[in-house]
C-alpha cells in the first residue's frame, strides 16, 4: 500500500512546475465515468498505450484507499490537472492518498502486458484500509 501526501505533492508541483508534464490526457485514455465510495466498479483493462479512467470526488477530506484487482496492471492516481499523485502495479493494486473535499481525482489503469489487455478488473474506493 502506498500512502502519499497531497500537501507534499502540492509543494512539489509549486517548486517544479516547469519540469512537470501532465501524464493523463483525454486523448490517451478511456474515461469510463465516476466511482462512488464503497461501491465496486467492474471494467476491462486497457492496453499499455491507454488508461481506463474513473473519477472520484470525495465528500470529506481524509485518507482514501483505491483498490484494483484483476490482471497484471499499472495504476496511477491523477489530480484534476492530469499530474501523477501516486502509482502502484501488480495483480492487486492498492493506493492510499489524502484526498481533499471538493477536488476531483482520477484513477487510471492499464495492462502492463498485452496478454492482460481486456481482462476483467474491479475498482473500489473506501476510507478503510483493505
Image: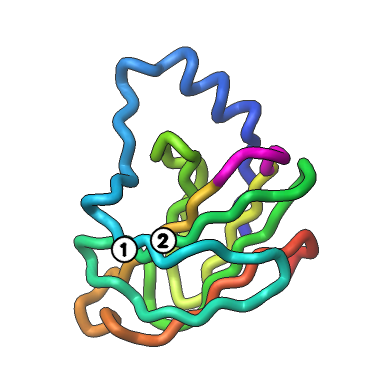
Magenta stretch encompasses residue 75: no
Residue shown at the point (20%, 61%) measured from the top left = 49
Pick the residue in front: 43 or 97: 43
Q: Quadrant of residue 102?
A: top right
Give percent across and percent down for residue 89.
43, 64
Task: Report whether 116 appears left or right of 58.
Answer: left
Q: What is the C-alpha distance between the residues marked 1 and 2?
A: 6 Å
In percent of width and height, residue 3 lies at: 65, 48
Q: Secondary structure at mark 2?
A: strand
Residue 122 percent coordinates (x, y): 52, 79
The C terminus sits in image quarter: bottom right
Q: Which residue in the structure is indicated by mark 2? A: 53
Q: Residue at x 62, y 71 (%)?
A: 124
Part of the protein shown in magenta: 99-104
| Helix, strand or loop for the magenta stretch, by majority | loop
95 left or right of 25?
A: right
Nearer-N-terminus badge (1/2): 1
Give the residue pinned by disc 1.
30
In the rendered image of this protein, does residue 13 appear above or below residue 97? above
Q: Residues within 10 Å of mark 2 (few under 14, many from 20)?
A: many
Q: Is 72 located above or below residue 59 in the figure? A: below
Q: Position of residue 67 (x, y in %)?
A: 59, 68
Amino acid at each position: 500500500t502506498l500512502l502519499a501526501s497531497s500537501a507534499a505533492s502540492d509543494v512539489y508541483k509549486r517548486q517544479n512546475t516547469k519540469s512537470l508534464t501532465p501524464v493523463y490526457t483525454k486523448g490517451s485514455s478511456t474515461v469510463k465515468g465516476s466511482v462512488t465510495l464503497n461501491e465496486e466498479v467492474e471494467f476491462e483493462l486497457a492496453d499499455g498505450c491507454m488508461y481506463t479512467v474513473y473519477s472520484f470526488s470525495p465528500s470529506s477530506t481524509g485518507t482514501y484507499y483505491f483498490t484494483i484487482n484483476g490482471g497484471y496492471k499499472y495504476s496511477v492516481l491523477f489530480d484534476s490537472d492530469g499530474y501523477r499523485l501516486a502509482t502502484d502495479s501488480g495483480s492487486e493494486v492498492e493506493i492510499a492518498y489524502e484526498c481533499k473535499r471538493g477536488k476531483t481525482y482520477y484513477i487510471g489503469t492499464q495492462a502492463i502486458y498485452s496478454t492482460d489487455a481486456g481482462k476483467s478488473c474491479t475498482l473500489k474506493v473506501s476510507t478503510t484500509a483493505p
